[in-house]
Image (tube, rainbow, N blue to C red):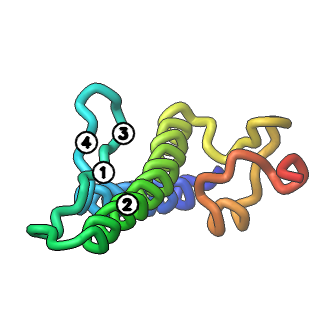
Amino acid sequence: MDKNFLAKAKKNLIERKGQLEKELEGFALKDKKVPGDYDSQFPDLGTLQSSDEDAQRVTAYENRLSVEYTLESQLTGINQTLAKIKRGTYGLCEKCGQPISEKRLVAMPEARFCLKCQK
């Protein structure tokens, strides 16, 4: 694989990793016991006056959990991809071992499979 392409991909992945971590830290705390895991915080909406406000708090928390899961999944994919770059296996299909096209890697840097094996 072209060294310039690889360097650019690594730079973009590191930037995206930082963005995801920053976004997660906006509403969740890093789990000290599980690397790469975050725990959403129950939203503080001030003093509750009614059951409607309590329901709003629960709904906000549920939304945070969903977003947390999505962001954690993306972060895991990026970390796995960065590990592949370090090992020198980035851009190789995990199923057939053939190179994944650079066009596919530009569109989806964390791609694990070539288009043929993705189907």
**Alpha carbons under labels 1 and 3: distance apart:** 10 Å
Tell me the element at label 3.
loop
Give the x, y percent position of residue 103: 72, 67
Question: Badge 2: how crowded within 10 Å, few (<14), some, or many (20+)?
Answer: many
Q: Nearer the viewer, mark 2 or mark 4?
A: 2
Question: Which residue was labeled with disc 2?
Answer: 64
Decide which of tag 2 and tag 4 comes sooner along the chain.
Answer: 4
- Residue designated by label 1: 40
Mark 2 and mark 3 lie on one chain; the one further toward the N terminus is: 3
For the residues marked 2 and 4, what is the alpha-carbon distance in whole angstroms? 14 Å
The picture places residue 10, in percent across and down from the top left corner, at: 46, 54
Q: CA distance from mark 4 to mark 1?
A: 9 Å
Residue count near mark 3 (Cα–Cα under 10 Å), binned few <14, some 14–19, many ≥20: some
- Image marks 1 and 2: residues in contact by CB distance under 8 Å: yes
Amino acid type of disc 4? Lys
| Image quadrant assignment for residue 84 | top right
62 to 49, vertically: above or below: above
**Labelled pair 2, 4 in contact (Cβ < 8 Å):** no
For label 3, the residue is 37
Amino acid at dot 2: Arg
Where in the figure is residue 15, as x and y percent of width and height? 36, 62
Foreground: disc 1 or disc 3? 1
Marks 4/3 in contact by CB < 8 Å: the verdict is: yes
- Residue at 34% x, 61% y is 58
Q: Secondary structure at mark 4?
A: strand
Task: Determine if residue 20 is in view.
Answer: yes
Question: Which sits in the foreground, 63 or 1?
Answer: 63
Question: Callout 1 environment at 10 Å: few (<14), some (14 to 19), or many (20+)?
Answer: many
